[in-house]
Amino acid sequence: MKTICKRLQRGDDLLLCIESLAKSHNIQAGVILSGVGCVLRARVRDASGVNVREIPAHCEIVSLNGTVSAARCHVHIALSDESLQTYGGHLLEGCIVNTTCELVIGVLDAWRFGAGFDEQTGYEELRFLRDSE
């Protein structure tokens, strides 16, 4: 496994930076190994797949994980505000880095991530593909 390490700067959009890294490094299959930092504000979607929550507060990133590829990124985040209340959900554009975000992505050898419509869920879902498939 190869790793990509990147320190994001104040004002960077977290999701857009992850997507940009995936494309610029032509990542076929990767996972977020670590994401540590803080944000000025955030946007997340809940498990319904519909409701979006704006979090207009400075928050620490307490967890960041997901699958990453040039074709598709699926990332979840957990954040803690100054009162230590925790928020979490599906990461959307609009999660803006405050001072920093130290991001580490592991690139998986011999794998590709694809996507295809899943009739059971009604969503485009991740497909795990070996390079030989």
Image (tube, rainbow, N blue to C red):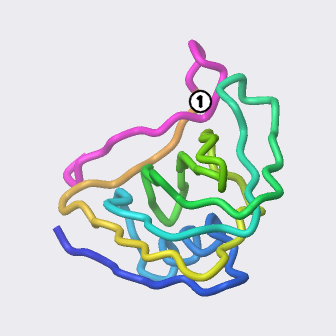
- Closest to the observer, 67 or 51: 51
Numbered range of the magenta stretch: 118-133
Q: Amino acid at mark 1?
A: Phe
Q: Residue at x 42, y 73 (%)?
A: 103
Residue 10 position, x and y percent, is 66, 85
Q: Which image quadrant for residue 13? A: bottom right
Residue 132 position, x and y percent, is 19, 51
100 to the left or right of 42: left
- Residue at numbered disc 1: 117
- Closest to the observer, 22 or 50: 50
Q: Quick one: SS at disc 1?
A: strand
Q: Which image quadrant for residue 131? A: bottom left
Residue 19 position, x and y percent, is 57, 68
| Rendered position, 37 above or below 66 | below
Could you classify mark 1 by the number of other residues whose Cα lies within 10 Å: few (under 14), some (14-19), or many (20 or more)?
few
Q: Residue furthest top?
A: 120
| Rendered position, 99 above or below 118 | below
